[in-house]
Image (cartoon, grey):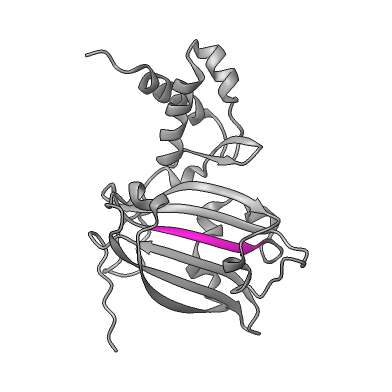
Amino acid sequence: MKTPIYIQIKKKIQEEIKDKNSNDAIESERDLSKRLNASRMTVRKALDELVEEGFLYRKKNKGTFVSDKSLWKKNTSVTNSEDEKLEYRLINFDVKYSIRDDVLKPLNLNDTDSFSIIRAIRVVLKDKRPQNIEEFYIIRSFIEEKNINKFDKLLDLNSYLKNSTMTQKFVPIRVPTKYAHNLKLNLDTPIIMIEGIVRTKSGVPYIYYKSYNNPKEKVIEITV
């Protein structure tokens, strides 16, 4: 059986980006379409899969970029015997200058304030199975410029907690429609969402975090 064209293109792009640096831009869909003699729809499908698998990420109105290569392989750093080997796939990364009220409130911001928010969304997998989806909203002024595109550091909550504190809330919800496919769950599946707020030692919030947990893979037990 002949390999579908979009798979051929996907493999070709995957080979080409091995020679690029993390955060390098790749060609536009239009340029790739011309060079590879394929429709933009076919090229887009190949890129979509590479984004979903964590090899690329998109910035709205700016293009498609090579993901941090440290995230291409499973994270094998183990801090204790109970830790799991995890893989991270970045599915969205951008900087927002306006944001929804449900994000402004936990960060103690108003829509009249001058601010920029780093938003990152990723899927956490174990043995290729989705464990949870994480959303990060980070006030940019708290992050060193050199670390903004180093996703392994930027999205490492444990590193922040060395000098900060975090409060968490466990909320039972239905899986959001936009994440049902990535979590491989049916619509309306009950899940637990964890909301976290990271604060400086002086109590100033600078990270708002959400984790949508897959009940088929991650069991959350709460003892009251």
Residue at 59% across, 74% down: 106
Q: Residue 93, relative to residue 47: is it above or below? A: below
Q: Where is residue 168 in the image (x, y as percent from the top left)?
A: 45, 78
Residue at 26% across, 77% down: 221
In the figure, residue 114 lies in which quadrant?
A: bottom right
Q: Where is residue 140 in the image (x, y as percent from the top left)?
A: 68, 61
Q: Quadrant of the C terminus?
A: bottom left
- Farthest residue, direction top: 37
**Magenta residues, as a range?**
133-139
Q: Where is residue 10 in the image (x, y as percent from the top left)?
A: 41, 25
Give left or right: position of 211 versus 114.
left
15 within the magenta span: no
In the figure, residue 172 lies in which quadrant?
A: bottom left
Residue at 56% across, 31% down: 20
| Whether residue 140 can be seen here | yes
In terms of depth relative to the viewer, which is nearer, 152 or 3?
Answer: 3
Q: Position of residue 43 (x, y in %)?
A: 47, 23
Give left or right: position of 129 versus 64.
left
| Whether residue 87 can be seen here | no
Give left or right: position of 2 versus 198.
left
The main secondary structure of the magenta stretch is: strand
- Farthest residue, direction bottom: 224
Q: Residue 39, relative to residue 144: is it above or below? A: above
Q: Quadrant of the N terminus?
A: top left
